[in-house]
Image: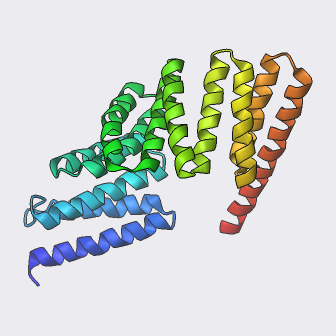
Amino acid sequence: MNYEEEIMQAIRIGLAVATFLLNIGRASKAIELCKENLVLLSNKALSTEKQLGQFIHKKICYTMFRAYCRVRDHTNAIAYGRKLLTIFRECGDTVQENLHSTALAWIYRQQSMYAEAKQLLERAIPVLRTTGNREQQAVAYGELGIVFESLGEYVKAKEYYEKALAISMKIGDKAEEAACYGNLGNVFRCLGEYVKAKEYYEKALAISMKTGDRAVEEACYGNLGNVFQSLGEYRKAKEYYEKALAISMKLVTEQEKEHVMKT
């Protein structure tokens, strides 16, 4: 084994360990190890232009992206996300490019960088339609709906939420279906159409109760409380706020117990 092969072997082992650390929740350690791998990969004896070097560089960037997302370092997540997009474009991997665009758009949205998120999603959606990945299409439509809602473009938001809803119902994705109903409820509430908002929140609530998603159930009760308050039905509003509060307190208690068990 020559010098170059020894370094590449060390990098492969380091990357495998970093991936393991990330999977067990030690993202910060994974980032440290990936940085060391990048230093090794930048050795003059190696070249990222070689096929193996390109592959490993892509894997390191992907691991770094995931790790920075885990620790909620959005600045570095965006930096590595953009590097990945460049890599996918250069190697002509349009499927991964557009799947990754949706993930990166989510981060942009979290940072209120709506123009950047909108650009990525509008570029990705036409390609996603051609791949037949219905689940990812629904996610992208939903994300674009949230972007338009955040920009105050409620008619556009409604259009994309309805597209996401149609796909999620067709493929039987109940979690996405509930999210779409909730998002449509938000749009109608923003438009002052409270009866319509109530209808969609109740649909989201019914699904969340069947699937056992307590976080979504809590959000639905809170949203319904907001609707009843807007309608002047304060007793009803109080009833739903209390239901939301009860679930919230229970979830917090469960999280505290889980944290104690881990420590």
Q: What x and y, as percent, mark residue 120? A: 33, 35
Q: In terms of image quadrants, where is residue 141? A: top left
Residue drawn at x 28%, y 42% as measured from the top left: 82
Instruction: State the residue in front, 33 or 201.
Output: 201
Locate the N terminus by quadrant: bottom left
Q: On the picture, is 144 further left or further right than 207?
A: left
Report how many numbered discs are placed on residues in the image.
0
What residue is rendered at 37% in x and 50% in y?
A: 132
Q: Residue lying at the far front in this picture: please name it.
A: 170
> Relative to the observer, which residue lies in front, 76 or 163?
163
**Which quadrant holds the C terminus?**
bottom right
Quadrant of residue 200 within the rendered picture = top right
Is residue 166 placed above or below 64 in the rendered structure? above
Residue 110 drawn at (x, y percent): 48, 35
Could you tell me if residue 263 is visible in this image?
Answer: no
Q: Position of residue 108 (x, y in %)?
A: 41, 35
Residue 198, relative to residue 62: is it above or below? above
Seen in the picture, residue 84 relative to 257 is either above or below; the reply is above
Residue 14 vs residue 141: left or right?
Answer: left
Whether residue 41 is visible, yes or no, is yes
Q: Position of residue 118 (x, y in %)?
A: 38, 29
Name the image colouring.
Answer: rainbow
Q: Quadrant for residue 236, please give it.
A: top right
Residue at point 32%, 37% (across, down) = 126
At x 51%, y 38%, the residue is 164
